[in-house]
Amino acid sequence: MRTTLDLTWRLLRGGGRRNLLGSLLTLAAVAVCTGLLLFAVTANLAFAQRAHADSWRHPGKADAHPVMIEALATDRVRDEPITVVDLAALGPDAPAPPGMPRFPRPGEAWTSPALARLMKDLPADRLAGRFPARAGTLGRDALIHPGELVAVVGHAPGDPAMTAARNDLSGVENTAAPTRIAAYATGAATFSGVYQALVAIASVLMVVPLLVFGGAAARLTVARRDRRLAALRLVGATPGQVVAITTAEAVITAAAGAVAGTVLYAAAIPALMHITIAGGGWYASDLWPGLPIVAGVLAAVPVLVGASAVVGLRRIVVSPLGVARRETPPAMRAVRPLVLVAVVIAFGAVSGGLTGLGRLGLVIMLVFLMLAFLAINLAGPWVVALIGRITVGLARGPARLLAGRRLMDDPRSAWRTVAGVALTGFVAGFLALLGGASTGTKASDELQLTVPPARASAVAEQIRGRLGGIDAGVTVKPLSTGDPAAGAAGPPAGAAGGDRPAEAAVVTVAVRGGSAAVDRARTVLAAAVPGQVATTPADEDRGRDRLLSDLRTGALTVLVVSFLIAITSAGITGASAVLDRRQAYAMLRLAGTPLKVLDRARRQETLIPLVVMGGGSLATGLFFAAPFAIGFGASGAVTLAAFVAVGFGGIAGASALSRPLLRSVTTDPAPTPD
């Protein structure tokens, strides 16, 4: 083992300037792969932490031996949601809520830091007047994100707020009637579960291309390495020694790249904290996966790269003379594209019923996404070889002919150059249909309270007396439960067991004077009907609108990560391909081939398969997203247009970076072998 490591280190250190450049390219590829892999893994952990911070606020089923009463409501200020948790102890053993040192006493409020600052900044009649006196500040464990507005209010068990029914608004995220419980809930609430499902899909869309990229990183400068190992094999090295040298070289380079990628990810955390999802940014602790996860990634990435480097050594072990003579390997089998066709057909057969299967449907969807990525990666080299044969047949110039011959000779290397953008095409196609637009047409200045008809007039008069100098009109409208709006309005206060009465009434306060006046009116109405929060018709759609906005933000984030993978992959593999073929380039240049012909051939062997494979993977992504499509409007069109523009622009830029290297390797009239 010591001899193998010494020989590996000598080969790495003594391989010359261009061999060092090849190792640096591999190191850079692994660093990018590691950093983005940490981001993808941490995203799942961060959303799980958010779900845990949100779960305790949602009371579960009533317990036979309760120790406290919990209720939940959503108020608003400046159109931002305020989560209000009402608690009442039934005995001295009521547990303290997360983020609090003790259980709240009746008549006191604990607020999040952001809400405390806002209560100081705004006049009391806009916000602070809705809550009892502040008793303390909620800690990190009680909050989903740093800017969240949360209030925990203590009550006596007999307070009207702890006995009256709550609004049952489907569009309001956080509403729950008073429930007698023995412990705080720990499972993810509905909205948290939706986000966790979405981030699982996003992780697959990021991680699988990363794994493909990581495997490709081990195959950089593969031609020079194979020839060098074949030479060692011919002079007497055993198959075991060849495998050991390859593994050691790949693992040493990958380990350095993994460490560099971890440092890059840690440096990016301050910027990642500002990505707004589900109403706010992130705590730094949420975005750091912890030492066990980091150690696992630092160990897994070199193993992946080492395993990928060993794959493909069969020709060196079995036929080193063929490798040394640069014989063309046998053609790939046509079963490769058939695997992709089978995956597409199988998905089409089951996709119609996935939305009704809940978590099982999500798991099946994730499996098919991974299979689609792997099938595209498997079929890619075969399709590139086919493109090469067609290009040669249609060639009318030396550059096109040379590009086609190279695609035929080494389709795997050509595929590694365009694989990143091709897989990104699948991601862009999948995300293009997962968009939607907010209508924003409902009134946001009409506050409504649902009351029993017998109390409607009295409540309306009470509200008129409290409004004071606020310019607002108060009306009462009878509302039958048969009306479509009745379901949104919810049961009146005092309805037992959630049963709806035959009739209800809605007290509407039409506020004039802008958002500040609406906030003052909300404060006035805070205690008008115990257990209810005044809402506007627009409030019912804000949760859906926020989810759609987060979908767009998540899609943009995934696309940015995918493009980083694609452009980095194209640039690094393009430069590596030039190093692999430097002797061939130099010989062609020595034979009189103009540099611009060589450069044009190099560009065409990238752009031709890119157009075909990028378009095919884009169509495949659209097909896989069709069962879950929300709509294909302006946002979807912009997504596709951005993919085409950024994808081709990035490839063109990455290709241009290889031109100086091409000029450098063709200046030596008598290139020395590695």
Image (tube, grey):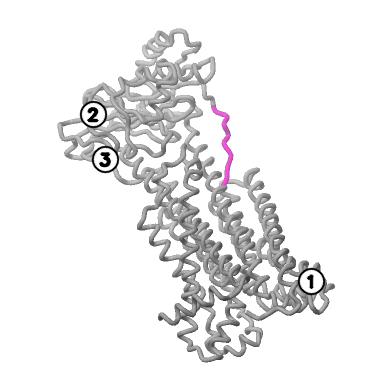
Residue 234 position in % (x across, y down): 56, 90
The answer to whether 133 appears left or right of 570 in the picture is: left
Q: Which residue is mark 1?
A: 400
Q: Are marks 2 and 1 in contact (CB under 8 Å)?
A: no
Q: Earlier in the sequence, mark 2 or mark 3?
A: 2
Query: Closer to the observer: label 2 or label 1?
Result: 1
Q: Nearer the viewer, residue 239 or 376?
A: 239
Residue 413 at x, y percent in the picture = 63, 72
Amino acid type shown at disc 2 = Ala
Query: Tag 3: Cα neighbours inside 10 Å, few (<14), some, or many (≥20)?
Result: some
Q: Which residue is mark 2?
A: 88
Which residues make up the magenta segment?
A: 435-442
Q: Is residue 511 magenta?
A: no
From this view, report whether residue 168 is shown above or below residue 421: above
Instruction: Classify the position of the C terminus by image quarter.
Output: bottom right
Going from the N terminus, do you reach mark 1 or mark 3 first? 3
Circles 2 and 3: CB distance less than 8 Å?
no
Describe residue 220's horizontal placement relative to residue 105 as left or right.
Answer: right
What is the CA distance from the residue labelled 2 to the residue labelled 1? 78 Å
Measured from the top left, where is residue 421 in percent x and y?
63, 60
- Residue 184's label in the rendered image is 3
Between 272 and 84, the residue placed more toward the observer is 272
User: Which element type, helix, strand or loop, lies under badge 1?
Assistant: helix
Q: Are the two marked residues, 1 and 3, in contact with CB atoms closer than 8 angstroms?
A: no
In which image quadrant can residue 320 be found? bottom right
Residue 198, labelled with which disc? none
Q: Can residue 623 be seen from the camera position used here?
A: no
Task: Examine the rendered structure and indicate whether residue 208 appears above or below residue 19.
Answer: above
Q: Secondary structure at mark 3?
A: loop
